[in-house]
Amino acid sequence: MKKVALFPGSFDPFTKGHEDIVLRGLKIFDEIIIAIGFNSQKKRYFDLDMMLEKINSCFVGYDNIRVDKYSELTATYANNHGAQYLLRGLRNTTDFEYENSIAMVNKDLYNGLETVFLITSPKFAFISSTIIREVHNYGGDVSKYIPYTL
Ligand code: ADP
């Protein structure tokens, strides 16, 4: 059976750290769905559809990567789209604490939905969407941290 992983996230914005997780994930999975989770009540910093296009532009030529957006339970989305795995990245113990509990609840919701974690590549360990938003908001150059041009 084809191994399909869902890489869910806010991706506000998608970073080189995220791209690295996807590309490394391709060594494990046959197909990866990158899905931007959104909540119509929560305002994003970068426009959702703009980000979807930017992410798509990073993976032109990869027929095993799809990009989508969703506003339901991540586990439900995975189940409805044939993903048997969730792919997530880990940078530090703060990520671990958070990821640990979501992985458990996702497995509880859909028995068999396994979360696979890839440890960040050291050169991207300090990159976070929050820091990029902050730098960008104050007019700083974020081009080094993102795999596309804004
Ligand atoms: P969420 O809002 O769901 O946490 P994010 O877009 O912030 O979504 O992150 C999506 C996933 O990517 C998370 O598992 C996060 O830990 C991981 N991630 C974020 N930045 C990096 C990075 N620099 N290196 C590795 N993983 C990362």
Image (cartoon, grey):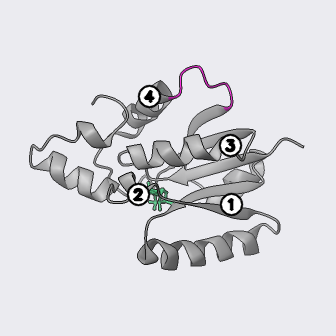
**Residue under numbered circle 4:** 53
* Residue 122, numbered label: 2
**Residue under numbered circle 3:** 27
- Image spot of residue 2 (x, y percent): 84, 41
Provide the residue span drawn in magenta.
59-64
For the point 64% across and 41% down, the residue is 33
The reply to whether discs 4 and 3 touch (Cβ–Cβ < 8 Å) is no
User: Mark 1 or mark 3, which is nearer to you?
Assistant: 3
The reply to whether discs 1 and 4 touch (Cβ–Cβ < 8 Å) is no
**Residue under numbered circle 1:** 75
Q: Residue furthest left?
A: 138
10 Å crowding of disc 4: few (<14), some (14-19), many (20+) = few
* SS at mark 2 in the image: helix
Looking at the image, residue 111 lies above or below residue 5: below
The reply to whether discs 2 and 4 touch (Cβ–Cβ < 8 Å) is no
Among the two numbered marks 1 and 4 on one chain, the one whose residue lies closer to the N terminus:
4
For the point 64% across and 71% down, the residue is 103
Mark 2: which amino acid? Pro
- Picture quarter with the C terminus: top left
10 Å crowding of disc 1: few (<14), some (14-19), many (20+) = many
User: Mark 2 or mark 4, which is nearer to you?
Assistant: 2
Among the two numbered marks 2 and 4 on one chain, the one whose residue lies closer to the N terminus:
4
- Image spot of residue 115 (x, y percent): 68, 63
Mark 4: which amino acid? Glu
* SS at mark 1 in the image: helix
- Picture quarter with the N terminus: top right
